[in-house]
Each structure stands twice: as C-alpha cells, then as structure tokens.
Amino acid sequence: MLSAATVMAPAAATQKSSLEVLLETIKKRDEQPKDAPPALPARPTCRGRLPTTRRPSLPAGFKLENDMATVVAMETVPVDKKPDVEKEISGLETKEDKPVKGHIFGTKRKFHNSEVLEESPYVESFHERKGTTVCKDPPSVSSASAKMNGKPACTDVMDYVRQKKLRVWCSSPNAKWELGQIKSISGGDAEILLADGKVLTISPEMLLPANPDVLDGVDDLIQMSYLNEPSVLYNLQLRYSRDLIYTKAGPVLIAVNPLKEVPLYGKTSIMQYKKKTKDDPHVYAVADLAFNEMLRDCINQSIIISGESGAGKTETAKIAMQYLAALGGASGMESEVLQTNVILEALGNAKTSRNDNSSRFGKLIEIYFSETGKMCGAKIQTFLLEKSRVVQRAQGERSYHIFYQLCSGAPPFLKKKLFLKSANDYNYLKQSNCLRIDGVNDSNKFTALVDALDTIQISKEDQMKLFSMLAAVLWMGNISFSVIDTENHVEVVSNEGLATAAKLLGCTSNQLVTAMSTRKIRAGNDSIIKKLTLPQAIDARDALAKSIYAHLFDWVVEQINHSLGTGRQCTWRSISILDIYGFECFNKNGFEQFCINYANERLQQHFNRHLFKLQQEEYLEDGIDWAPVEFVDNTDCLSLFEKKPLGLLSLLDEESTFPKATDLSFANKLKQQLSGNSCFKGEQEGTFKICHYAGEVTYDTSGFLEKNRDPLHSDSIQLLSSCKCELPKHFASVMVADSQNKSSQSWHSVVDTQKQSVVTKFKLSLVAAKKSLVSDDMATRTARSDFTPAHAQYNSEDTLSTGTHTPEVIESRHHNHHPEAKVSAGNSDRRVNAVNHLEKEFEDRRQVFEDDAGFLVAVKSGQVGSNMNPDEELRKLKDRFATWKKDYKSRLKETKVNLQKVGTHDEKSRKRWWGKKSSK
C-alpha cells in the first residue's frame, strides 16, 4: 500500500510512472523493519456518563465453579428514587412454558484466592455518590485486573449482590420479568424487593443480572453488560417510551412499530444522514451504509426485511426506498420507483385481524444505479400471493384494498362502464362484515392509485383493462346456482352477476354457464359432458376468479418492470430490498401459514449463515482464537420441509397427485412417515405440529391438497382463450405456455400437467430470491409495540422476547405467538469488513501492477542503449511482487488477529463473576 508521503510527493522534473513509485516504495520498506499493524480507529463509547476508572477488588474466596451464567456487579438506584418510567416498564414477559434454568446464583459458588477477577467499573462510583459502604479489599488493584487479597466480607455470590445492592431481574409467578434488589437470603431462597415496594420470595435460579442504570437506553445493545432477555426488552421499551423506535444490535437494526406519527423522517432528516451530521440508529443509516458500500466496493448490496404481521415491514421498506431515491435522485427514475409502492399495496395488501395494511405477498425489489450513484431502473419479483383472500377470508378482515378503492373512488363514467355498485353489493366483499378501515379514505386512495399508474406510464387503455378485470371478478362472486335434481347437480341462475361478468370478460353468458356448471371428460376419442354438484360448481367459480386475479397481479408487475427497465442500459450495481411475510401463528393455521413459515425458516437460515457461520468459518481459516457463538440453528426444521423423498413438501406433492387422496389421508401419512422427527409432532383430527425456530405451530390440513393443486380445469382455460377481451386471452396463453414447458401433451389435458404444485413453485421462487441476495446483507429487526393497532403503546405482555446478535453472544428467541420482525441489513462485523475491503484492494492493485509492469518493460527495452530483455524483466518484477504479496498476506492475517483481540478486549472485561453475558 502506498504511504501518504509517497502519494503526496510533488512531481519531479521527469514524471515517474506509478509502477516506479511502487517499486521504490517496496524497496524502501524492505530496507526498514516491518510495519506494525495499521492503527485502529477509536472504539465508540457509550453516550451515558463515564464510569470511574478506579476498580475495587472483589473479596477473596469469591469464585464461580462453572460458567453457566454471567454475573457482573452493577450500580443500583434506591427503590424510592427510581425514575417513573422504570415503574411503568417493570414487569416484562417471560416464557411460561420454560422455567429459567439455573444460571444465576448458588450458595456453593465461592471465590478462591487463586481467582483473578474484577468488579464492574460502575459499582464504586455509585457508592461514592450515594455514600454507602462498599464491601471490598484493600485497594491493591490495577486498571486492568483486581487480585483477590484479604478476608472477604461476604462469602458467596448472593451475599455479595445483596450487600452491593445490585439490581437483578426476577421471573415472577405471573410470567413477567420484575426489576428489584435482593433484600435477604434464607433457606436457599431469596427475598426480592421489587420496584413497586412488594417483596417476592423466589429461587436464585429465577434471577438474571440487570445492567447498571448508566446503560439504560443505550442505542446499541452490544454496549450493554448483559444481553439477557429482560435487559434487552427493558432497553427497547425504555427507548420506545422516548419515541426512539430504532435500536442497533451490532450489525442488526431493531425497529419497534410506533403505530403513530413520529418526527424521524422527511427531507431534513434525510439530509442529516446524507451529510453524516447524524448517526443515530435509523433505517436511513442502513440504506446509507448499503449505498456507500455499493459505491466503494463495487458490490451489489441487499437489505432484508421480515417480521410478524403489523411490525412495520412494508413501511420500513418504503422508508429505505425513499432514502435511496434521495441519494440517487436527479435521474427522474426515483419518483417512478417510489410510486410502485402505491400500486403494489393496492393490489397485494389487505386488512387482517392484526394489521390494517398487511402485505399478502412477498417481494424482492432490485434498484439499479449507475457508476455515479444515480438511480437508473428497478425490477420487482413477487411470490406467493394469497389468492384465496379474493373469495374468502376470516370475519373482520377485508379482501384486497383495490376492490374497495374501485367501488368507492371510481368516477361516474367508470362506474357506468363497469356497472359498478357499492362494495356492500358484492358477495366476495361483504361476506366478512368488514367494508371500511378506520381512518382510511378508499376514495382518496383510488385517486392516488391512478396517479401512480400514470407516473409508472401505464396507459389509460391498460388501466381500463385492469379495472374491467377487477369488476369482472366482483361480479363473478354474485353468480349463484340452483340444485336441479336429487344428485345435487346444479345449473347457473341467470341473474345480473352472470350477464355482467360475461360482458366484462368478453364472452357469452352460455359460455360462462358451461364452464361453471359442467365438465368435459375425455373417454378415449370421445368426450362426455358431466354436470357438477353444488360444491363443485362453487369451487369452479371461485377457482376461475382466483386465477384471473392472480394473473392480473402478475400482469401489473410485468407492466411496472417494463416501465422501470427503460433506463437499465446504464445499470452498474444494485441494492435489493427483500420484504417478506413474517412468521404467523393463529388459532387456526392453514396452508398459507404453512408456506409463510417455511419462507421464514429459509430466511432465518440465510440470516444465520451470513451473520454467524461464515464469520466463524473465516476465523477458523485465519487461525483466530475465538469463542464459538451459540445461536438457534434451524437446519433440522428446514430439512423437515425440504428433505427428499420424506420431507413435508415432497409428501404434500406426492399426496396431491392422487385423485382420491384427502386432507385426512395426508395428515395420516405425515404422522406415519415423520413421527421420529424431533421437529414434527402428529396430532389428532387432521392436524400436526412443527417446532419452528420461533416456536411450535399447529397446522390444520383442511384444504391443503386443493390449495397445493390449485386446479383450473381445461374448460375454464378454454373459456378464457375464447374471450374477446385481450387480458383473458393473455392469461390463457400464459397457462398453456407453462404447461407446454413441462409436458408435450395436448393442451386439452392441461388440467393434469397445468403447472407445478404451489409449494414447489414457491420453493423455486425462494431459491431465485436467495440468489439475488448478496452476502453483505444489512440487518434490521422490527417488532410490534402493541397487539391492538389503535393503541400506540408498548405492551410488555404482548411483546416477544427479543434476540440480539453480537460476535460474542447471540440469542435469537421468539415467542411462539408473536415472533419479532426483523430487517436484515447486510454488513458483517465492521472490523472484518474493513479487512475484506483491503483484500479487494489488494487484488485490484495486483492487476494494475501486472499491466504497468508489462508496459514499463516494453518502453524501457526500446530506449537507446538498452539491453533489457522484456520477458526476463517482467518475470523478475513478478517474482518480486510475489514475494511482496506473501509478506502482505502474512501481515493481513496478523492484522485480522489484532483486530479481533482489540474488538474483544472490552467485552472480556465484562465477563468476570457472572460467567456468561447471556442466558437461555
């Protein structure tokens, strides 16, 4: 690497080439002692008040006999002087089904004189301020360590913590974490004085260490002394009470949905992060990091966003896109990219019981930039749209927003052309008894949708096609049937729904009647017309409606991609944003939750691999001394899904191919084949349980086979192909093309080989999405603040246990009903990332060196009087470079080791008398 002096040297009379300068630098370096590893930047410090540098020793004889847990002395505040917010926040939820394992105190754990331990730097300063007595030995200690001398004033950990009046977390009988102090110890139990003045008697095994108040509300969880569950929850809750909804956990950003407007966004805030005048945790900071690393390293970046429904994933993705648009503006493309959110939300979002604007599909948005950082295009990939929501949903929920927006906001001429009525007149919309969302004006939303379609440059003609298909789907839901014989056969009732749907599709009423009430069955060379029963006719109608909507959704995405791809010729690098459904667990979980949770298992594996596994593999390769990181590895659960031939997906596909198979037979097959799997539990009455990384979920197999087959009979496809309108014909051609790619049979038998099963297609889409993601993922985790959207408050009883991720301690725990949302923003440990940048720079310089060397030799060999052999001189230069390269790599490895030592020095000082920093 060129020194600053070399680079800054003024030009001589005869200009030297860069290669000559480099060779002179190497020569000078070879003649001098080897350089020390490069100086490291100053380690960031906590923004709270600084602790005293004086460290008293612990009493002699104080020892831990195992490393089950971490214990560190921390300061405490008298109960009667605790801040009000602490009284509001004390009482955090803990898991009910698992008692806290013994990792705290024990009367047999004593210190011995041979142990070298030290106390938290905060304790003595606390006693100095409060004037209390300190249990300590003579002050014969250094700033680095404290040796045990003298007779101890307290003989075990419990007495020590009690005398020091250190704060602890205790798991109360009502399954909450309570903050308090040890009042007394009797018979192996501890009396804990809680923040509200109550006294609780519990076993020491139900205690966890609490951080000193100087660390309350830190903006990065790795600054905390203890990363146990209650400490993390308390810190997030304390920050939330101050409207600080973003918190870092090393390379991960945690965001808690405020469910209200907070003054954290807008042009002013964007400029602050853009100019680096503000560095508080924020989605803007994540997007800024991705953008700058893309420009600096010339590597594609990705921002992964996931979380439970209502955690704020969609809004977080929009905020990240807003910031990237501001950075890459002035190209005219940024407004189009931002307007895609309006269109996709209208078509793919709906009101659920937990979220008024829940995304019912997953999406991967790739935003392309030029070499100068200007936004020049985008591409959207979607997967697993919840088609069933078009025809049915739970009570209190809505279908997709666009239906209600169309009925409410369409201008008179459009309503007349599409024969539109109010939403309450359509069976598909009124069945769930929910037509409106509080605080949402569907009419205004429709106006915004049309503006967005105009911005994306979707023509008025195509917009009319879109609205016509939407109206056709609504009118199809009003088609009814009447039973005509004792065998439950039906005929279509000639009503307004039938006639209007036929007009909008561009077919005759008779064609629509035939497709919905009969089936053409081939028997050899003959065809037999079979009448459908009432359930079969309803299924045929709903299947056609779902198919039209799903293909319409895909068609709109194609139009968006076509519009956003107009500037792709200048594409250089990209930033991908993955917004995927969060882990779901309801009272009744079906096929949709099965697929969604499988996707989250996939995402969790990606997260684990790039944040933990790859980093640890690099440590092993480089010979770095490190402590293995414990984290929840979901490999077994993912194998349960994907293993062949006895994985969940394979067994589901196999059972779906049998015409006489039922949902109950599928459940029985799972129980028979997977009963020995630790992640699977067979249940009664067609249900089964899966032990996910986020907890157990019980699935009801009702509808699994039908939804996985997703059948659309050839009669319905033929109907669409015969329509006069362009879009139905397009949908039919897409389905036929898909089938022909997988079978050489006639398209009349397309019902048998129409397409891959839903789970297989979904799996392939996840694989494709994974390939688009790079290893430099940015990480952000978002969590719901309260179960009820109307309340902008932090409810500890409804909040998950929150995992944190640091190089030393990782505990990713989730409540089985409310897993936290997470946004993953790609950036490994910053120290190692700096080394990775040096590695890339090294390869770049190597190529430049070889090019310059060849050029220099060729020029000098042509000079008068030169006897140089160009090939021989080039070989010598390359040999010298190889020697330099070997030495460079050796120093690089040494630098990595030193970086690791420096990075863990402060962390090791925290591990003294509690054992581990975190607990399970």
Image (tube, rainbow, N blue to C red):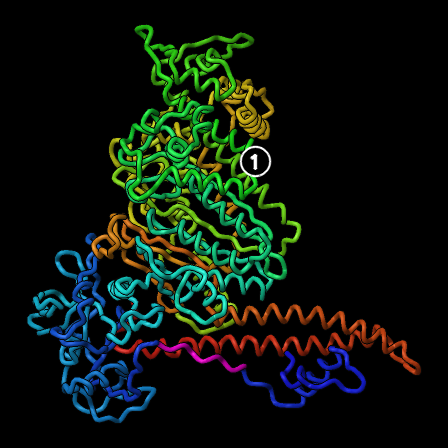
Q: Give the dominant element type of the magenta stretch: helix, strand or loop.
A: loop
Question: Which amino acid, mark 1?
Answer: Ser
Image quarter of the N terminus? bottom right
Q: Provide residue 264's location: percent of width, then percent of height.
A: 38, 61
Identify the residue at image location x=57%, y=69%: 837
Please tell me whether residue 189 is drawn above or below residue 683 in the rendered image. Answer: below
Task: Say which residue label 1 marks.
Answer: 459
Identify the residue at image location x=64%, y=90%: 32
Image quarter of the C terminus? bottom left
**Residue 539 lies in quadrant:** top left
Q: Provide residue 542's location: percent of width, then percent of height.
A: 39, 24
Please tell me whether residue 282 is drawn above or below residue 456 in the rendered image. Answer: below
Please tell me whether residue 752 is drawn above or below residue 62 in the rendered image. Answer: above
**Residue 123 lies in quadrant:** bottom left
Q: Is residue 419 magenta?
A: no
Identify the residue at image location x=90%, y=81%: 866
The secondary element bearing badge 1 is classed as: loop
Q: Provide residue 50's location: percent of width, then percent of height.
A: 31, 82
Is any atom of residue 920 visible in this view?
Answer: no
Which stretch did the figure color magenta?
38-46
Is any atom of residue 808 visible in this view?
Answer: yes
Q: Provide residue 499's location: percent of width, then percent of height.
A: 43, 15
